[in-house]
Amino acid sequence: MADVAAIWKNALPTVMNGVTGRGVWAALNAARPVALDEGVLVLGLPYQDGELAGHLRLAPTQRLIEQTVGQALGSPVRVRIIEGTSDEDYELAKRRDAEKRRLQEQEMAKLRAEMQAKTSWDSVYEQLSRRFAAVPNKSLAQNRARFYEEALELVAEARRGQANYDELGERNFARCIERVAQYVEIPNTMVALEVLKRTGEL
């Protein structure tokens, strides 16, 4: 900590000479070096001066701090601004970072699953269209019945492989049921009944 404090003390005059504005000067004077962590200079602001953080996060100010401190250290440095000036404040900031990453990863996993599910049901929907288009003499009930049997198994197979039973997944499932019902001229509820029987849900 003593080294970080000394580096910041030596760099501060140079940084202040390179910026203008009372707000930036006040922010620089209030900032305290908290840590130098894997190439990141962590500067903290006392809670009562938290509103000054925006001045330190301005791109020109950050670049100047990084260049000045980086030259002193002889290696590239990034700057991070946190609330508080203690090691405990920094630990809290890192825990918040970890939680934010966890939530982001969770959201991304959910989005990937939704996209995968949608893609799967879109594929089923397209297959239903292609298979019905290939049915000869569609006006004949027996030919539509054969298609119906094939379509039920196709939709049931996709349903058995459905990973998420959320609203999006259910809507895409219902969309395929509706497509079958339109093709074979049967109420969609009856189509759903047959599919759910095949999947063991009824």
Image: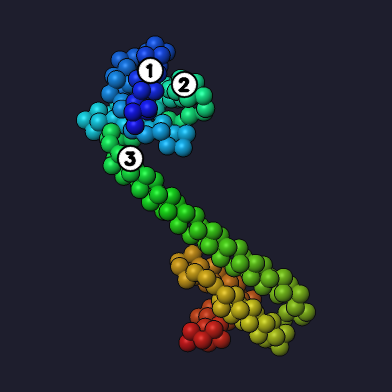
Q: How busy is the neighbourhood of tag 2: few (under 14 within 10 Å), some, or many (20 plus)?
A: some
Task: Identify which residue, 144 or 23, lies in the foreground.
Answer: 23
Question: Mark 1 = which residue?
Answer: 10
Q: How busy is the neighbourhood of tag 1: few (under 14 within 10 Å), some, or many (20 plus)?
A: some
Task: Identify which residue, 17 or 166, lies in the foreground.
Answer: 17
Question: Mark 2 = which residue?
Answer: 72
Q: Give the vertical position of 66 relative to 134 (above or below).
A: above
Q: State yes or no: discs 1 and 2 in contact (Cβ < 8 Å).
A: yes
At 33% across and 28% down in the image, what residue appears? 2
First reached walking from the N terminus: tag 1 or tag 3: 1
| Type of amino acid under label 3 | Tyr
Disc nearest the viewer among 3 and 2: 2
Task: Identify which residue, 153 or 190, lies in the foreground.
Answer: 153
Question: Mark 3 = which residue?
Answer: 90
Residue 158 picture location, percent across and down: 60, 75
Q: Give the vertical position of 169 relative to 20 (above or below).
A: below
Image mark for residue 85: none
Residue 82 picture location, percent across and down: 33, 35
The answer to whether residue 190 is visible is no
Residue 93 is left or right of residue 180, and the answer is left
Residue 52 picture location, percent across and down: 30, 26
Q: State yes or no: discs 3 and 2 in contact (Cβ < 8 Å).
A: no
At 75% across and 78% down in the image, what residue appears? 135
Disc nearest the viewer among 1 and 3: 1
